[in-house]
Image (cartoon, rainbow, N blue to C red):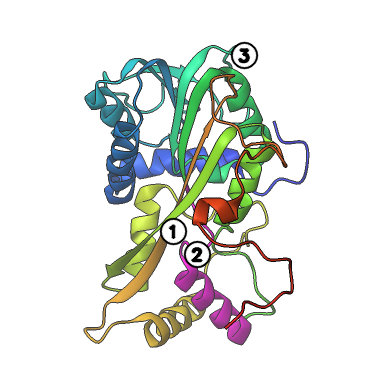
Amino acid sequence: MASGPLLFDRRLLRARRLRAQALGPSTFLIDRVADELGDRLAAVLRSFERAVDLGTPTDAVRRALAASGKVGGIIAADALAGQVPFSLSGSPVAADEEALPFRDGSLDLVVSALALGFVNDLPGTLIQIRRALRPDGLLLAALAGGDTLTELRQAFAAAEAEIEDGISPRVAPFADVRELGALLQRAGFALPVADVERLTVRYASPVALMHDLRRMGATNALVERRRRPLKRALLRRMVAIYGERFSDPDGRIRATFEIVWLSGWAPHASQQKPLAPGSARQRLADALGVKERPAGEKAGR
């Protein structure tokens, strides 16, 4: 578990997920991510005997794994195993993303959708995943990126600056693609790749967006969140600012969801490795068919 300062209230996150199940979950985003994960897995020319879906809040990813034909056994590792319904596409195991129960070198594939961004020690979790993978095992994960809900964050900050004594964290901070790519390398993954997908979703109003976030289980669970109920005056001003800055001509408002995709392999001797400096057998000038000139020398006319 995380030993440094805590960013997320993990118990509250679990409670918010249970509430979302009771309300009737909003799944359009996780369903889209699961479809994309299936497409990315289809491009990998191998199969995986033992896979873990780590913390994904629905069974959408496990359905994609089962439909791929590339995965043998699927384990659904979730802190809410036993508390929320699980489909037949996966054997549930109670597990927190911050304390994995898997032996070193016991897994071939770990996938996760929109869950790892809410752990308090993401570097530690990535290291645990890499250790749990067999050599040449694959991690494929999607996390919310830094620009996710940037409009809601800005509107709340502007409204609070006008009405309250200072600004409080209303929307969780998310890491950007460069930071996440560097974390893969630090965790010891080979061939790490990080890329970004940006989605713009339109809503009738900011309140409709907030209701959707509630049904995703994705409302504010920051440890440093303001505990007092949201004032009506602040909500009204936030709605007005959001509409002024981020609405379309038809009156609907925009909300950004940035998805950062991470992939990395547990190191294996068969994987490609960069050449050592000075080991090239041919000069670049020869390969390009041009004459090599010393640095600073100008080409003749």
Which residue is rendered at x = 41% and y = 26% of the image?
Answer: 83
Q: Residue furthest right?
A: 4
Q: Nearer the viewer, residue 207 or 271?
A: 271
Considering only order in the chain, which callout, 3 or 2, is on the residue closer to the N terminus? Answer: 3
> On the rendered structure, is 264 left or right of 2?
left
**Front one among 115 and 34:** 34
Q: Secondary structure at mark 1?
A: strand
Residue 238's spot in the image, x, y percent?
A: 47, 79
Foreground disc of the pair 2, 3: 3
Label 1 or label 3, whichever comes before in sequence order: 3
Between disc 1 and disc 2, whose residue precedes?
2
- The residue beneath circle 1 is 258
Q: CA distance from mark 2 to mark 3?
A: 35 Å
Alpha-carbon distance for marks 1 and 2? 6 Å
Tell me the kind of residue under disc 1. Glu
Labels 1 and 3 touching (C-beta < 8 A): no
Q: Is residue 121 visible?
A: no
Residue under the image location 44 percent in, 31 percent down: 111
> Where, quadrant-wise, is the C terminus in this rendering?
bottom right
The amino acid at mark 3 is: Asp
Q: Quadrant of the N terminus?
A: top right
Whether 241 is drawn above or below 204: the answer is below
What residue is disc 2 on?
Answer: 147
Residue at 34% x, 26% y is 45
Locate residue 59, reporting x and y percent.
31, 31
Identified by mark 2, the residue type is Asp
Magenta stretch bounds: 143-163
Quickly name the residue at label 3.
104
